[in-house]
Image (spheres, helix red, strand yellow):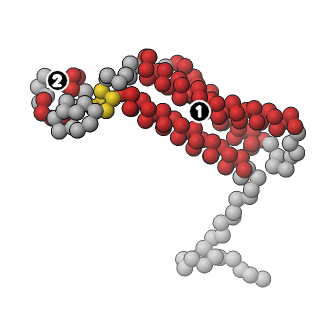
């Protein structure tokens, strides 16, 4: 658990570092060869971290510490989810209609796809912020009740 949380925090801090550095760096500043190599190395590190280390730590956590194996079920066909944890007064027929076996390995894999999706969204947002860091925001012109701008010409 500690390794997964630490890896996720390092990944998020790396994304925050890019945004903070982007706010500090002038838009038209020339880029030296060394700065380009450092940026490329950092970008590679972040890709490796979000698509290699964090998913690996999640899979290790789910497999080893939580015991999410293919013989543990979230929902079993004809039995239902958490049937062994239900109280004695719970009717057995409640989940007899359930047609699917959902193993914890399937849940683990769906969640790791979600981690990949979070990494993808973070990268897209991070680089959109980087690319738009020097652009001026449009100024809103107040409008009348009829939707026309309240600006006098001349």
Question: Which of 141/128 is in front?
Answer: 128
* Residue at 69% from the left image edge and 64% from the top image edge: 139
The earlier-in-sequence mark between 1 and 2 is 1
Circle 1 residue: 51
Question: Which of 151/62 is in front?
Answer: 62
Quadrant of the image containing the C terminus: bottom right
Let me know if residue 13 appears in the view: no
* Residue at 53% from the left image edge and 29% from the top image edge: 55
* Residue at 74% from the left image edge and 56% from the top image edge: 135
Circle 2 residue: 87
**Percent coordinates x, y for residue 59 in the rendering:** 48, 25
Up-down relation of residue 118 to residue 87 (above or below): below
Q: Is residue 62 left or right of residue 49?
A: left
Question: Which of 100/11 is in front?
Answer: 100
Q: Specify the label residue 11 is tagged with.
A: none
Structural crowding at the residue carrying mark 1, measured as other residues with C-alpha within 10 Å and reported as few (<14), some (14–19) or many (≥20): some
Question: Which of 52/87 is in front?
Answer: 52
* Residue at 43% from the left image edge and 20% from the top image edge: 63
Up-down relation of residue 67 to residue 25 (above or below): above
Q: Quadrant of residue 93?
A: top left
Structural crowding at the residue carrying mark 2, measured as other residues with C-alpha within 10 Å and reported as few (<14), some (14–19) or many (≥20): few
Let me know if residue 69 appears in the view: yes
**Percent coordinates x, y for residue 3 in the rendering:** 55, 19
Residue positioned most to the top: 65
Q: Quadrant of residue 96?
A: top left
**Percent coordinates x, y for residue 8 in the rendering:** 57, 28
Question: Distance from label 1 to label 2 (Cα)?
Answer: 41 Å
**Percent coordinates x, y for residue 5 in the rendering:** 53, 24
- Circle 2 SS class: loop
Q: Is residue 20 left or right of residue 3?
A: right
Q: Quadrant of residue 40?
A: top right
């Amino acid at each position: 658990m500690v390794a997964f949380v630490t890896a996720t925090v390092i990944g998020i801090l790396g994304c925050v570092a890019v945004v903070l550095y982007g706010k500090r760096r002038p838009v038209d500043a020339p880029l030296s060869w060394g700065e380009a190599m450092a940026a490329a190395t950092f970008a590679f590190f972040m890709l490796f971290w979000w698509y290699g280390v964090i998913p690996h730590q999640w899979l290790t956590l789910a497999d080893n510490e939580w015991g999410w194996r293919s013989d543990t079920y979230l929902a079993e066909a004809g039995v239902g989810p958490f049937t062994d944890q239900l109280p004695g007064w719970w009717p057995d027929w409640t989940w007899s209609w359930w047609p699917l076996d959902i193993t914890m390995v399937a849940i683990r894999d769906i969640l790791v796809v979600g981690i990949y999706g979070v990494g993808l969204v973070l990268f897209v947002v991070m680089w959109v912020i980087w690319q738009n860091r020097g652009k001026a925001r449009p100024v809103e012109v107040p409008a009348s009740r009829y939707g026309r701008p309240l600006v006098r010409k001349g």
